[in-house]
Structures are given as structure tokens and as C-alpha cells.
Image (spheres, coloured by chain):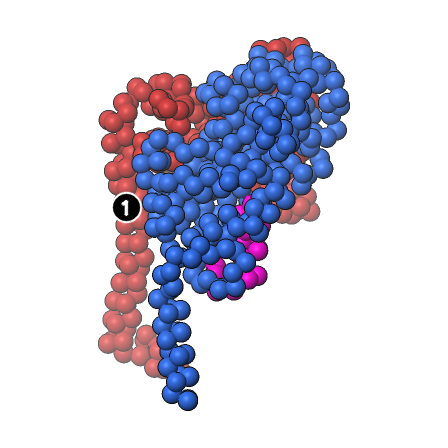
Amino acid sequence: MKKLLTGALVLMLALGVTGCSSDDSESGDDTAAVSGTVTMNGSTSMEDLVESIIETLASTNPELTISCEYTGSSSGTAAAIEGTANIGNASRNLKDEELETLTENIVAYDGIAVIVSADMDASGIDLSMDDLAAIYKGEITNWSEVGGEDMAIVVIGRDSASGTRGAFEEIVGVEDECAYGQEIESTGAVIGKVTETEGAIGYVSLNVVADYEDVQALSLDGAEASSENISNGTYLLFRPFVMATVGTIEEQSEAVQFIFDFISSEDGQAIISTLGLISAE
Amino acid sequence: MKKDKLSIIANRKTKSMVEKTAAMIFCGCSVVSIVSVVFITAFMFYKGVPTFFEVGFGEILFSTDWAPTASDPSYGILYIILTSIIGVTMAVILAVPIGILTAVNLAEIAKPKTRGLVKGAVELLAGIPSIVYGMIGYMVLNPWMYKLEKLIYSGDSSHTFTGGANLLSAVIVLAIMILPTLINITETALQAVPDDFRKSSYALGASKMQTIFKVVLPTAKTGIASAIVLGVGRAIGEAMAICVVAGNVVNFPWPFNSVRFLTTAIVTDMKYATGTHMSVLYAIALVLFVFIMVINIILTTIIKKGDLHD
């Protein structure tokens, strides 16, 4: 009897070590804990999403270590290409030269909010996409030109490593034509600058705006910045959240596959909708 | 440990051994510094020079179009070079009178109590980390600068408002940062002027101020020159503080423009640059390196000249 038990134990251990190669699509609420380490690197806009995923998985999978650095989309994809990160997070579509090595796994869609300080009276401001382009090109330099107070506009943008900047400039149609007053290195720093500088305008990921009371998002073409309006096609400033990997998801380590499985599971989708993101399913 | 065992006077054998070991240790230390310098220099040229041939000298040094991430990238750093030169020059022009006069006060005029106070303040100024200068500039200087900017450019629709993050902010932060260097070295130079000079000057009927400006300062000019050159060196190499206050957009260095310096250009892009973009950053580093080298050569020339004359 004892021998049998030991045998069964050994068998179980062996299976556990080599990893079950059955093709069961594991869902997040499966109790089988996964072990391993996963490193991510990339978009500062995706911090809320990634941190929520890490927190949720850490509680149920003590053996799984996920770490993420938030350095900007282009740094993330560069890290994935160089192999210093398993997953490169980009808050924009991948460029052609990135697609040569990386697979674009879109995990969600996120809006880009155009923000001003909460102290500003934005009730009269009616901003169209063309106005926004004119502001960023430096053709409109005072809020009174778009129905606001008589106040100079300080155009705040992100550094060129930013996926938010790439997506914003592409959608608004101001690529390489922006007359930035300042270039800032992270989402949080843009919010700080916009809060502190009178008349400043900036763009950040829509899902972080709710965390800050000091800034407000402007409507575009009469549509409020919200996930409903992105879904119904009235708010046009949005971009994908990409978790790029070298090769397809099936070729990744078990731990990486587990993360992607979790994101498409019910729990993962719940996180995405809680954060105000739009599901990629 | 017994004392007589370790004494180098105990006998000739231990003495010569101690001498040899000490000489070897000193030699080793020197080799470390020399190897570091040689390696860094070689590496800079090895990484930087090919870029100039790949992209083109004129394309990098004399073009003003910096768009490294565009689909058709261009790598012109002329504005960035000009910003560094003009910004540092302005900072030095601002800081030199303040620094030298402070040093004159410390060395020639101040009573011991005042001297202790000022000395302490200057030493503290030297000890403040550069990022703290940047933070204070960001929180205090930028808002002031923005008020000034709005006064000057009110109603001017062609001006890009920067919220106070501009060349002037960076210049002021740099000027404050190089003060300790200027003050300390100038003060040392002034104190090295022999007292006989002052006494002779007084004996001829000169006043205190005449003595300071006509006798002491001209005598110490070599030391003051090296203080200025070292200040320039420190200002050119500073990145952290001005990264926060200068706005970081590549523009021509007009006072109220948001600008990018050579150092901040490297800091901003190096975390994600790949391929040619990364090589161009090495080229920028090489330009910076050459600047510093030139400044050092000037410094050594000044000191040598001073030795010949005095």
C-alpha cells in the first residue's frame, strides 16, 4: 500500500515537473497553480491593467513571479526583440519593422483622453478633431478660439518613445507636425504638468483619468471620452493595448501562456471592463 | 600584531619589500585610471565615428531636423549643439560675476563670522544632488517663468507657450549649480596672492577696493580662468537637472523656447533607441566628449601660460 502511494506521488511529481501537455484550455479559475517567472516591459499607459493582472494572479499562484517595468511602448518592444523581456507592452499598433520579429497580441482597446486642468472652465469649449489638430500644430494658441476662457494654450506631449503619442498623432493626423511646448516622459508626469500649468492641454490613456481628480477629459466632436462612445463609434481617439511576444502565444513558456489565458478568461475580462477598457474579444 | 614585526626600519629586507609593494600598488592604481580613460575614449570613437560616415557629417552636424522615429528618419542635431553652447555660455555669463565677487568677499573683505556662514552655504550648495535642483526648478522656477512668458508674449499667436519650461529656466538652474565650483577655486586663487602685493599697494596709497580690483584679481587671473573653465565643464555635462526644467523639445535656443541639450537628448532617447537612432546617440555623446576634451585642453593651456608669466 505504501509502495503504491509513493509510486503515485512520484508519478504525480513527474507529471507536475514536465508540465501537462494536454490541450485543455486552462481558464483563470482553474486551481492548478503555475510556476515560473515572466518579465514584461513597456507602455506606461498599461500600468493599471498590468498591475491588476499581476495582483490577481499573485494571490492564486504564489509560485508565479511576474514583473513589469514601465518605460514606454518603444522601449518595451525593443526589450522583447532583444530578449530582455518575455512580453513587450505597447499601447499602439506595432510598426512593420517590429512585426518582423514580434507577434501582435491585442489584449484590449483603450481610449486616449485629451485632458485639461480641473480648475479650468471647460463648459464652453467645443472641440472638433480639426481644432485639436490645429492646437497641436500651433495654429490655435488661445482657449478663447475654441470657446474657452482667454488663456494661452500650453501644448504638452509625450516623448517619442510613447505609444500614446504615436497613436494620438496618427489618429489626429499631426504626425511630425506637432509644435510641442514640452515633451514629457510618462503618463503620470503629463497629468502632473497639466495640473500645475495654467491652460495646459495633454493626452493620456483614458483609463487613468478616473484615478485623478485634478484633470478633466474634454469631449471631442461633441462625444464624451468614455468606453461606451468608443464602442458606438462616436469617440474616435482610441488605440489597442498590445502584449507583443517573439513568436506566437503557443510558442511561449507555460507561464506566459497562462497570463494570456487568464486575460481571455472571465476574470481577466472583468478586470478589463472594470478599468474602463474595451475588450478585444 | 607586534610593532617591531611591521616596522619598515627593522631591517633592509622588509624595508625593500614594503617599498616595492607600495610602488606596485601605486602603479596599479594609476593603470586603472589610465585604462578607464583609454577604454572610454576608444569606445566613444569606435561607436560614434562610423555613424558620421553612415548618416553623413553634414546630415548630423548641420541639419536642424531631428525626427529619429519618423518613417523617414532625420538626425540633425544642430539645434541641440547650439542649445548646449548658448545655454552654457549664458549660464557662465550669469554665474561668473556672482561667483567671483562672492569669492572676493570671502577672501578679502568678510569678517570671520560672515565667512563661516557663506562658506557653509557654498559647501551645501555644492552638495545638493542635481535632481533636487531640477525639482526645485520645476516647482518654483517654471511657474514664475510662465508668468513672465505670458507677460511678454500675450496676444502673440506665433509663439508656442511652454508653461515656463524653457532655455532661461535651464540657464538659471545651471548658473546656480556651477557657483560652488567658481567660488571655491577663485577663493583659493585669491588666497594664493602673496600678502606683500596688498601691503605694497596700500603703501602706495591705494584704497582697499583699488587694491582688490587692480592688484589682487589681475594677479589671480590664471586661477580664475581655470575656475571658469571648470564651471563650463560642469555645466556642459549636467543632464539630470535641466532634463526636468528645459521642456525637452528640439528647438532653436531662443530664451523662451522649450529646448533640448546634448546631455538630455541622450537621456531622453537611450532607453528605447535602436539601430541608427542608437548610433546617432553615440555620435551625440562623441560631440559632447569632444567639447569636454577641448575645454580641458584650454584649461591646461591657461595653467601652463600662467606658470610662464608668473
Q: Residue at x 40, y 69 (%)?
A: A16
Residue B170, horizontal then vertical, whole percent: 55, 29
Q: Which chain is red?
A: B
Given residues B301 and B26, the one toward you in this image is B26
Where, by quadrant of the figure, is residue B61 drawn? top left
Given residues A276 and B43, the one toward you in this image is A276
In magenta segment, residue A72: no
Where, by quadrant of the figure, is residue B128 drawn? top right
Residue A30, horizontal then vertical, whole percent: 51, 60
CA neighbours of label 1 inside 10 A, class few (<14), some (14 to 19), many (20+): few
Report the span colored magenta: A49-67
Residue A270, horizontal then vertical, whole percent: 60, 47
Disc 1 sits on a residue from what chain? B
Q: Which chain is blue?
A: A
Residue B158, horizontal then vertical, whole percent: 58, 11
Please indicate, yes or no, whether residue A64 appears anywhere in the rendered image: yes
Where, by quadrant of the figure, is residue B292 drawn? top left
Given residues B200 and A213, the one toward you in this image is A213
